[in-house]
Image (spheres, helix red, strand yellow):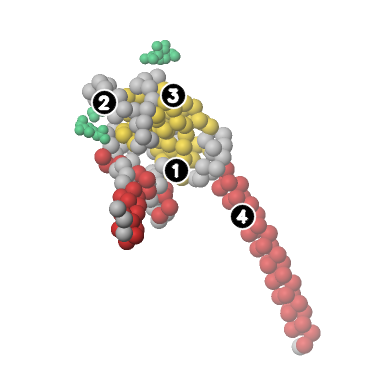
Amino acid sequence: MEVPAGFLVVYLLFSCFVASSYGVYFSSLNETLIVTATPTQGQVLKAGEDQISVTWRFNQTYRAGTDSAYKTVKVKLCYAPISQKDRSWRKTVDLLKKDKTCPHKIVARPYTASNNSFTWTIERDIPSGVYFVRAFAFNAQDEQVAYGQTTNAHKSTNLFEIQAITGRHMSLDIASICFSAFSIVALAGFFYMEKRKAKGSQEK
Ligand SMILES: *[C@@H]1O[C@H](CO)[C@@H](O)[C@H](O)[C@H]1NC(C)=O
Ligand SMILES: *[C@@H]1O[C@H](CO)[C@@H](O)[C@H](O)[C@H]1NC(C)=O
Ligand SMILES: *[C@@H]1O[C@H](CO)[C@@H](O)[C@H](O)[C@H]1NC(C)=O
């Protein structure tokens, strides 16, 4: 039997479309993990120096066996809404494949229901911002099947702040560059004025 080329093309396009439209939606996941992190509400931490200890465990009020498909847990550092504002590259999208809320991986571990903890030194390249911690449980197909987070559903409680290394140094550098540029301009301006003044008094 001969398959018409046109049919093949349509079939390929269709399978691509199906593949790309398939995905897990955050809103479909249950919050079955209890996640805690050491930073207190409003605490300011320094990237490259300070540490965050995270714990996670299965919430036992869910029926036993709910977690039978959980294979791995990935813990992530996530932007609070205030640090997403006007930054489309950090946007929250319900389709998790396109979600940019949690771009910073803290740790990945095989799933166990209790006794999980990890201490993370905030990496040097973490940008300044307001954050929370979220953990995703993945199944054997590497799809998200559940989550837990240190903040509430509105992402308004238990938020903490991280100050970037580069931000700290860069703002100092920028300040000193601006200051030197300003001094040169001011100095040049001063000499120019003086010269004009001198010229003006000569012409009188
Ligand atoms: C979330 O929980 C509900 C009720 O327990 C269950 O029907 C549903 O399948 C769960 N969703 C996922 C993604 O496990
Ligand atoms: C565990 O899950 C139940 C049901 O969703 C919830 O009411 C409870 O607050 C959760 N426990 C913790 C410690 O988050
Ligand atoms: C959790 O860890 C502690 C100390 O490492 C151990 O004594 C305890 O038995 C563990 N509990 C479970 C449920 O694995």
Mark 4 crowdedness (10 Å alpha carbons): few <14, some 14-19, many ≥20: few
Give the Cα distance between marks 1 and 4: 27 Å
Between residue 178 and residue 19, name the one nearer to us. Answer: 19
Q: Looking at numbered disc 3 in the image, what kind of residue is underneath it?
A: Ser
Mark 2 crowdedness (10 Å alpha carbons): few <14, some 14-19, many ≥20: few
Q: Looking at numbered disc 2 in the image, what kind of residue is underneath it?
A: Thr
Assign a secondary structure to mark 4.
helix
Residue 198 in the image: state x and y as whole percent.
77, 79
The residue that mark 2 highlights is: 66
Q: Quadrant of ligand 3?
A: top left
Give left or right: position of 197 versus 50: right
Q: Looking at numbered disc 4 in the image, what kind of residue is underneath it?
A: Ile
> Which one is earlier in the sequence, the residue at label 1 or at label 3?
1
Residue 103: give its label. Answer: 1
The residue that mark 3 highlights is: 117
> Which one is earlier in the sequence, the residue at label 2 or at label 1?
2
- Name which residue lies at 37% across and 48% down: 98
Quadrant of res 143? top left
Assign a secondary structure to mark 2.
loop
Q: Decide if ligand 1 comes within 8 Å of the CB at mark 2.
A: yes
Q: Looking at numbered disc 1 in the image, what kind of residue is underneath it?
A: Pro
Mark 3 crowdedness (10 Å alpha carbons): few <14, some 14-19, many ≥20: some
Q: Is residue 101 visible?
A: yes
